[in-house]
Every structure is written in structure tokens, then in C-alpha cells.
């Protein structure tokens, strides 16, 4: 009898979470936005966001159920979920980018153009991030937010998840720290070293080293967050496709120095293409209804550098973005029309601000006594309101 009442208590505690997904609806659609990394080229997705914002006629963030980003795309994602408009983000981008990618002749000579040490100081980027986000915590994102990075101490990818940050200070950081971590591009900026709100020390580098296009990871997380979803609207914004190749002689005879620069572009470009291929295969159009939208305009080699913040280059990238927007405006309108519809999943209903992670063994001890036959998932959550 005691076991019965304990199990009943568990059901009572988790009922508010379950109830949020048991609304009367024919289509439980989850809306996902994912933004690639690309340094200065992130002006391209920023302008696409601005156009989408114009079509939606309001802030973009709360029209999506989950927003994900890598590197510069991570900065845009953080900005959107901090309630900045796309226009504001573009203004910040243009005002700060030159100082972030500014280097002295002596520094460039000392680092041999980035071969011996990082090209740029972290100071201007950190100053910009602190100015925009101040002391706001990642747990305060107004929409579930996923930001990619790489933990060089643990030697594995690290995903900043706002819903996990709400539940546990071990995964909570200042927003400026998350931005610094996801954009710490190797050879361009030093690793980002800081502590979580629980005091644990980390060393992060740019998420683009493993997952420059975060679309697939975003959808995987959305499936976990919204297990009863019956449909997905997925918007994936790239920073431009540039043919990446090495000459035959380099492929045959190249050493560390020959591959040091081009290999990064090859890896990122290849990974982006594979992710797009996978997404297209997993989410094909059904009955003429497109559910996965990828915007990835062609960018010529002369505009492809991650750190060319000169006005001429930025203007060229903006022209590329505007051409892409013009060519794809019908698709953007289709997306906007759907985003303007009421969301099935309400962030308030999900009560993400009050989720608490409960350890598997503590749950068994508290509610199931010594009954080891009942398994409790480690990610089990309750609502403490």
C-alpha cells in the first residue's frame, strides 16, 4: 500500500508537465531555429532573421520552441533569447566586429599570422558581450536555447542547454560566458576559461570544431523536450557555402603547416553539407508541404574569411544575403505565416523556469524505497510550483 501511495505522489507531481502536452490539437508542431557559425559571415543569417522578423511583424524569439546556434550563430541565438530584435543584433554586429578582429602589425608578426599563437585578443569580444548581456544568466533565456561548444578538458562536445541551466547551477553560466565559449575559434581567439555558477572550472573552444551546423542536434533535443510532437517546422540558417578544396600537390605532400589553415574550412564545409543531407532525408516535403528550410547562399572565396571585417567585405556579404532573401522570399513568407499562428507548446505551460533535475538513486530512495525493480530516468523532472 505504501508503494501505491508513493507512485501516486509521483504521478501527481509530474502531472502538470504531462498536462501541458495533452491539449486538444490535431498537429503538435514544434518550431526549431538553428544558426550556423561563420565569424563575420554571420551577417548573412542575421539579415535573414531581420526579413523574417519583418514578415512576422514582431519579435522572433517567442515564435519558436527551441533556438540553437554555433559560434557567431550562437551569439545571434543568445541575442534573440535575450529579447534583442534582429535589427539590434545587426547594429551590434556592425559596430563591434572590426574591433573584435583588429590586430597590430607586431602581434601579427609575433604570431606568424596565427601559426604560433591566436591571432586576436579576447578583450574586445568579452567587452562587447558583457556590454550587451551584463550579468544575465543563461538560465534566463526566454526560449529553450541550445548553444554548442567543445570542452577541451573533457575532450568532448559540450552543449549549453538553458533548460538544464534552470535546473542545476553546475550547467548555468553568465550569457556572456556562453557567448565567449561558443565563439572561441582555435587560432583566432584563445580558449574560454571560467567557472559555472556552481564553481566548476571549464576550458571551452568554438563549437564549430565539431558541429558548425547545429540543426540536427537542435532537432534531437527538441524530440526529447517535446516527446509528443507530431510535426516539426525547422529553419536552418547558414553563413554561406564556399567550395573548399586543396591542390593535388598539397594533398600528396602537405604537412602540418600546409594543412593548418585549409583543413578547418574543409572540415566545417563538409560537416555542414552532411548535416543538410541528413536533414533533407529525415524531413522531406510531404504532400507538397515543406517542413525543413535551409538557407545557404553561395559565397565566393574572396569573401569567405571568418575574420575579414573590412567594410568592403561586410558590404559584399550583405549584398549576398539580400540576394538570397530576394530569391527565397516566398519560402520566408511561408515560414512567417506559420510562425504567426499560435504555438501549440506554451513556454509557460511547460514551466521550464521551475524544472528541477532529480537524481535517479535519490528518486528511488525517496519514493520507491528499496524496490530496485522500478527504473527512473536520470533526466526525470518535476515541477516545484
Image (cartoon, rainbow, N blue to C red):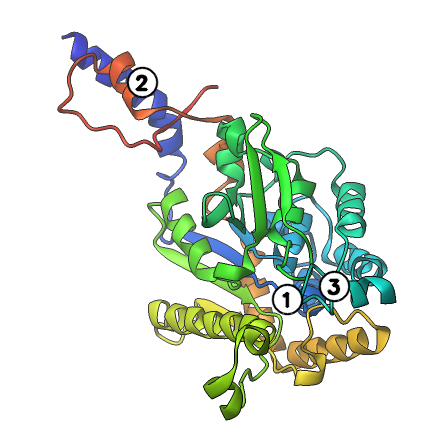
In the rendered structure, are the residues bearing label 2 and label 3 in contact, judged by CB atoms less than 8 Å apart?
A: no
Which image quadrant is residue 227 in? top left
Callout 2 secondary element: helix
Q: Distance from label 3 to label 1 (Cα)?
A: 22 Å
Residue at the location (77% across, 53% down)?
Answer: 121
* Picture coordinates of residue 146, whole percent (x, y): 52, 48
226 horizontally vs 9: left or right: right
Residue at x 66% of width, y 55% of height: 76
Q: Residues within 10 Å of mark 3 (few under 14, many from 20)?
A: some
Residue that badge 2 annotates: 362
Placement of 206 over or under 366, stated as above or below? below
Between discs 2 and 1, the one toward the N terminus: 1
Relative to 71, say whether 160 is above or below.
above
Q: Secondary structure at mark 3?
A: loop
Which quadrant of the rendered structure holds the N terminus?
top left
- Considering the numbered disc 1 on the image, is that residue within a helix, a strand or a loop? loop
Callout 1: 10 Å neighbours few (<14), some, many (20+)?
many
Q: Is residue 342 visible?
A: no
Kindly report which numbered mark, 2 or 3, lies closer to the viewer in this rendering.
Answer: 3
Residue 350 at x, y percent in the picture: 46, 35
Give the mark nearer the N terminus: 3 vs 1. Answer: 1
| Image marks 3 and 1: residues in contact by CB distance under 8 Å | no
**In the image, residue 142 lies at what x, y percent?**
61, 40
Mark 3, residue position? 111
- Mark pair 2, 1: CA separation: 43 Å
- Residue 201 vertical placement versus 225 (above, below): above
Question: In this view of the protein, which residue sits in the foreground, 262 or 74?
Answer: 262
Given residues 145 and 231, the one toward you in this image is 145
- Residue 38's disc is 1
On screen, residue 336 above or below 256: above
Estimate how packed mark 2 is, as few (under 14), some (14 to 19) or many (20 or more) residues with alpha carbons within 10 Å.
few
Which mark sits nearer the N-terminus, 2 or 3?
3
Amino acid at each position: 500500500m505504501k508503494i501505491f501511495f508513493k507512485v501516486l505522489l509521483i504521478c501527481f507531481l509530474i502531472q502538470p508537465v504531462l498536462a501541458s502536452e495533452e491539449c486538444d490539437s490535431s498537429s503538435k508542431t514544434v518550431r526549431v531555429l538553428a544558426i550556423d557559425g561563420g565569424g563575420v559571415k554571420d551577417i548573412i543569417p542575421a539579415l535573414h532573421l531581420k526579413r523574417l522578423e519583418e514578415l512576422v511583424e514582431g519579435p522572433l524569439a517567442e515564435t519558436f520552441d527551441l533556438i540553437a546556434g554555433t559560434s557567431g550563430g550562437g551569439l545571434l541565438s543568445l541575442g534573440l533569447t535575450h529579447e534583442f530584435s534582429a535589427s539590434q543584433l545587426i547594429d551590434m554586429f556592425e559596430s563591434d566586429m572590426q574591433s573584435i578582429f583588429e590586430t597590430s602589425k607586431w602581434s601579427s608578426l609575433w604570431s606568424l599570422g596565427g601559426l604560433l599563437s591566436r591571432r586576436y585578443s579576447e578583450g574586445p569580444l568579452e567587452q562587447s558581450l558583457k556590454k550587451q548581456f551584463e550579468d544575465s544568466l543563461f538560465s534566463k533565456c526566454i526560449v529553450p536555447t541550445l548553444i554548442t561548444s567543445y570542452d577541451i578538458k573533457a575532450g568532448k562536445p559540450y552543449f549549453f542547454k538553458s533548460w538544464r541551466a534552470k535546473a542545476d547551477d553546475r550547467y548555468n553560466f553568465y550569457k556572456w560566458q556562453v557567448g565567449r565559449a561558443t565563439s572561441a575559434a582555435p587560432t583566432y581567439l584563445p580558449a574560454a576559461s571560467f567557472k559555472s555558477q556552481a564553481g566548476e572550472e571549464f576550458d571551452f573552444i568554438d563549437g564549430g570544431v565539431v558541429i558548425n551546423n547545429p540543426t540536427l542536434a537542435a532537432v534531437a533535443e527538441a524530440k526529447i523536450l517535446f516527446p509528443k510532437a507530431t510535426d516539426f517546422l525547422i529553419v536552418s540558417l547558414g553563413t554561406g557555402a564556399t567550395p573548399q578544396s586543396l591542390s593535388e600537390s598539397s594533398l600528396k605532400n602537405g604537412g602540418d603547416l600546409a594543412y593548418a589553415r585549409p583543413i578547418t574550412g574543409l572540415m566545417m564545409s563538409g560537416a555542414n553539407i552532411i548535416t543538410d543531407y541528413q536533414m533533407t532525408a529525415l524531413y522531406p516535403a510531404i504532400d507538397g508541404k515543406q517542413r525543413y528550410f535551409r538557407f545557404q547562399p553561395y559565397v565566393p572565396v574572396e569573401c569567405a574569411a571568418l575574420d575579414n571585417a573590412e567594410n568592403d567585405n561586410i558590404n559584399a556579404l550583405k549584398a549576398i544575403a539580400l540576394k538570397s532573401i530576394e530569391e527565397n522570399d516566398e519560402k520566408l513568407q511561408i515560414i512567417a505565416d506559420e510562425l504567426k499562428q499560435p504555438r501549440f507548446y506554451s513556454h509557460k505551460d511547460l514551466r521550464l523556469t521551475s524544472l528541477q533535475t532529480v537524481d535517479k538513486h535519490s528518486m528511488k530512495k525517496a519514493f520507491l524505497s528499496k524496490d530496485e525493480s522500478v527504473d527512473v530516468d536520470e533526466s526525470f523532472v518535476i515541477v516545484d510550483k
